[in-house]
């Protein structure tokens, strides 16, 4: 499913500050340089260890940023300056270490990669240190948690606090992340087209009204050009539309938090860190969800990087503000150490808690997904789109399913019609992406 999100890119950062929704697809800034973005953390958990490479480029006229994954790179991680572990590209721009690999406390890790143009990059060595376990989680519904600039004035969220016992024998630095899992009902969207399970046969039509499909699997959008491809071909309207398709199998939306929360224990060394707020999870919809809360250890250099990032994002008041100074991370081009790269490669032990967010404490409150404006443009008797709070929260609009046959009287017709049409509209598979998964997350309650 395609989603649209607007972010303010803090120049030189691997992470971004959300202004409207959840995932980075459109980025805004006042520079036009091409920015190489690296994002990767080696952990001690038995989980996919992934390095992500992207490139961001601003349009010289509009200032709008677009990000594209960097493919066909050669990526490896060097363990203890001796052992080389090769990564393989799973999704575009995502490079995964072998499935049985996980980091170990006390060992060092260094990222190296070569792009398709031959340019080579390397990070500093990162030693993985232990992290204290999360001792307790406390969650409070707060109608005024979020800044009014984040979700078009919507401010309600669940504030998540943790307790952890800080070790007294060492200087520790912490970072926290959160990830929200929600059941997703919509798995694919087609702009100016329709979803086709089977490939459309070339130059085969029915009644000058239908494109005809064969038996070869296709599983994607069929988007013919506007107009008529031939005398017998159907007329394709020259207009913009989007049809959304439900999920064929269970599917979960993955919503990553972009809060930057770090802590230096110099003021609490050896004490119980109590009621540390680590997440503000927006009240997207009324359905329960699962929140993963991660507590990381940091090196002193990594802490300073994320601390500066935190300070800059907190002082970013809006698009009219002066852009912050570039924050170069710990990755640079080989032979050109002055050429810094956006992002920070790190290694960290992790304490993870799965928290079931039942949202029973939100009674009487309005969810963000319920703030969708009512569509008054449709004539009486026409097909009415289905409401879905999570879909609106992610996409900024309500889902618009393809109209189903028979196309009689005042019922809307699909803009593009396929034959046979007994199964229209079809359901789409739940694909494994950064934003959704067909695999039930650990800790999910049915």
Image (tube, rainbow, N blue to C red):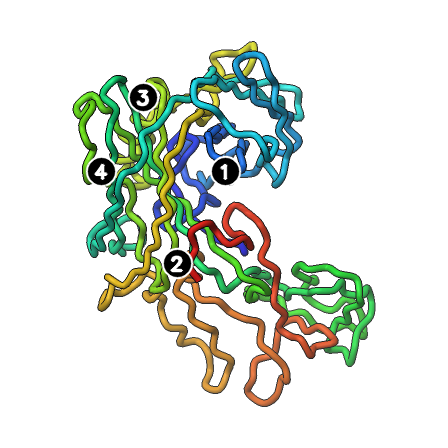
* Labelled pair 2, 3 in contact (Cβ < 8 Å): no
Q: Earlier in the sequence, mark 4 or mark 2?
A: 4
- The answer to whether residue 43 is seen in the rendering is yes
Give the spatial CA distance, label 3 vs label 1. Answer: 31 Å
Report the quarter where the N terminus lies. bottom right
Location of residue 267 with respect to 405 vertically, above or below: above
Residue denoted by label 2: 393
Q: Which residue is mark 1?
A: 59
Q: Is residue 243 left or right of residue 129?
A: right
Residue reaching furthest to the top: 335
In percent of width and height, residue 406 lies at 64, 85
Quadrant in which residue 203 is drawn = bottom right
- Decide: is 114 above or below 136: above
Q: Earlier in the sequence, mark 2 or mark 1?
A: 1
* Residue sitting nearer the eye, 123 or 196: 123
Q: Seen in the image, is 366 located left or right of residue 107?
A: left
Other residues around mark 4 within 10 Å, as few (<14) / some (14–19) / many (≥20): some
Inspect this view and state whether residue 147 appears: no
Residue holding disc 4: 276
Q: CA distance from mark 1 to mark 4?
A: 40 Å
Label 3 neighbourhood size at 10 Å, few (<14), some (14-19), many (20+)? Answer: some
**Do the CB atoms of the residues marked 1 and 4 lie less than 8 Å apart?**
no
Residue highlighted by disc 3: 304
Reading the chain from its start, which is encountered first: label 2 or label 3?
3
What is the distance, in whole Å, between disc 3 and disc 4 at their CAs? 19 Å
- Which image quarter holds the C terminus? bottom left
- Residue at 29% from the left image edge and 60% from the top image edge: 359
């Amino acid at each position: 499913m395609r989603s649209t999100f607007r972010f303010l890119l803090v120049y030189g950062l691997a992470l971004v500050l959300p202004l409207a929704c959840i995932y980075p697809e459109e980025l805004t800034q006042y520079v036009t340089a091409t920015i190489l973005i690296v994002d990767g953390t080696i952990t001690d958990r038995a989980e996919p260890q992934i390095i992500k490479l992207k490139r961001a480029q601003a349009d010289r006229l509009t200032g709008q940023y677009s990000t594209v994954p960097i493919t066909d790179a050669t990526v490896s991680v060097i363990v203890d300056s001796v052992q080389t572990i090769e990564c393989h590209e799973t999704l575009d721009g995502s490079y995964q270490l072998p499935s049985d690999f996980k980091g170990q406390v006390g060992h060092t890790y260094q990222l190296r990669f070569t792009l398709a143009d031959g340019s080579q990059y390397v990070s500093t060595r990162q030693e993985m240190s232990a992290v204290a376990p999360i001792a307790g989680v406390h969650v409070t519904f707060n109608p005024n948690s979020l800044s009014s600039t984040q979700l078009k004035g919507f401010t309600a969220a669940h504030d998540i606090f943790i307790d952890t016992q800080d070790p007294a024998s060492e200087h520790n630095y912490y970072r926290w992340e959160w990830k929200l899992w929600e059941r997703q009902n919509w798995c694919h969207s087609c702009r100016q087209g329709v979803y086709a399970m089977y490939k459309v046969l070339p130059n085969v039509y029915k009644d000058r009204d239908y494109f005809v499909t064969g038996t070869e699997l296709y599983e994607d959008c069929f988007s013919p050009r506007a107009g008529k491809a031939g005398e017998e071909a159907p007329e394709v309207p020259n207009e913009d539309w989007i049809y959304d398709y439900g999920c064929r199998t269970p599917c979960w939306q993955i919503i990553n938090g972009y809060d930057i929360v770090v802590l230096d224990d110099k003021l609490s060394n050896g004490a119980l860190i109590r009621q540390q707020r680590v997440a503000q999870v927006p009240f997207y919809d009324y359905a329960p969800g699962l929140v993963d809360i991660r507590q990381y250890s940091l090196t002193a250099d990594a802490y300073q990087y994320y601390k500066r990032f935190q300070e800059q994002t907190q002082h970013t008041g809006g698009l009219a503000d002066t852009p912050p100074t570039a924050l170069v991370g710990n990755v640079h081009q080989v032979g050109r150490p002055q050429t810094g790269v956006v992002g920070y490669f790190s290694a960290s032990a992790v304490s993870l808690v799965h928290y079931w967010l039942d949202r029973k404490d939100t009674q009487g409150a309005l969810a963000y997904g319920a703030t969708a404006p009512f569509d008054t443009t449709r004539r009486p008797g026409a097909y009415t789109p289905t409401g879905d709070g999570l879909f609106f929260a992610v996409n900024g609009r309500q889902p618009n399913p393809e109209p189903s046959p028979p196309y009689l009287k005042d019922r809307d017709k699909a803009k593009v019609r396929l034959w046979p049409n007994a199964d229209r509209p079809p359901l789409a598979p739940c694909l494994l992406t950064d934003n959704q998964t067909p695999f039930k997350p650990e800790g999910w309650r049915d």
